[in-house]
Amino acid sequence: MNTNIQVIEKDGIEEYAIVPIDEWRRICALAEDAEDIRAADSSVRELAAGYDETVPMEIVRRLLEGAHPLSVWRKYRGMTQQELAEAAGMGKSYVSQIESGAKSGSVKSLQRLSEVLRVDIDDLIVDDDS
């Protein structure tokens, strides 16, 4: 550590420290590394506890390429439209219309679908701005 640090006191109590810029950058990098490690540790704990899951790159690719998220997640979970519809308490045609983009799906319907598919409701919403 650099000993070229200036300490400023107020009423005899150390209040500020002035450090050389290179030392400041090193401290910031260390703090950023520590934050990254905490985030990674938290993710590992969530995975181990079953609060989160890893997703194959193929699923991510299909979502990024614009496939409807309901269809992607349904297929990833190994369900047919009929099975998903029955589990969510709705008709197969409604699920089909959502997947095709003919309907956007009500919030209540998307919530039920997200629960069956074990994803956040946000994961099923199509971003029309992209």
Image (cartoon, grey):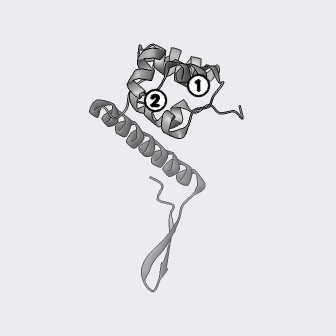
Q: Residue at x 27, y 34 (%)?
A: 49
Identify the residue under disc 1.
Answer: 98
Relative horizontal placement of residue 49, taking residue 99 as reference (left or right): left
Q: Where residue 54 appears, x then y in whole percent?
A: 41, 24
Dot 2: few (<14), some (14–19), or many (≥20) neighbours within 10 Å? many
Q: Residue at x 54, y 54 (%)?
A: 24
Identify the residue under disc 2.
Answer: 113
Residue 11 visible somewhere in the drawing: yes
Q: Where residue 64 appears, x then y in whole percent?
A: 61, 23
Above or below, 32 relative to 57:
below
Is the residue under label 1 in contact with that under label 2 (CB below 8 Å)? Answer: yes
Q: Where residue 103 appears, x then y in whole percent?
A: 63, 28
Q: Quadrant of the C terminus?
A: top right
Residue 68 visible somewhere in the drawing: no
Q: Secondary structure at mark 2?
A: helix
Dot 1: few (<14), some (14–19), or many (≥20) neighbours within 10 Å? many
Query: Disc 2 or 1, which lies upstream in sequence?
Result: 1
Above or below, 57 relative to 1:
above
Q: Nearer the viewer, residue 44 or 11?
A: 44
Kind of residue at badge 2? Leu
Kind of residue at badge 1? Ile
Q: Residue at x 46, y 46 (%)?
A: 30
Q: Residue at x 56, y 37 (%)?
A: 106
Q: Secondary structure at mark 1?
A: helix
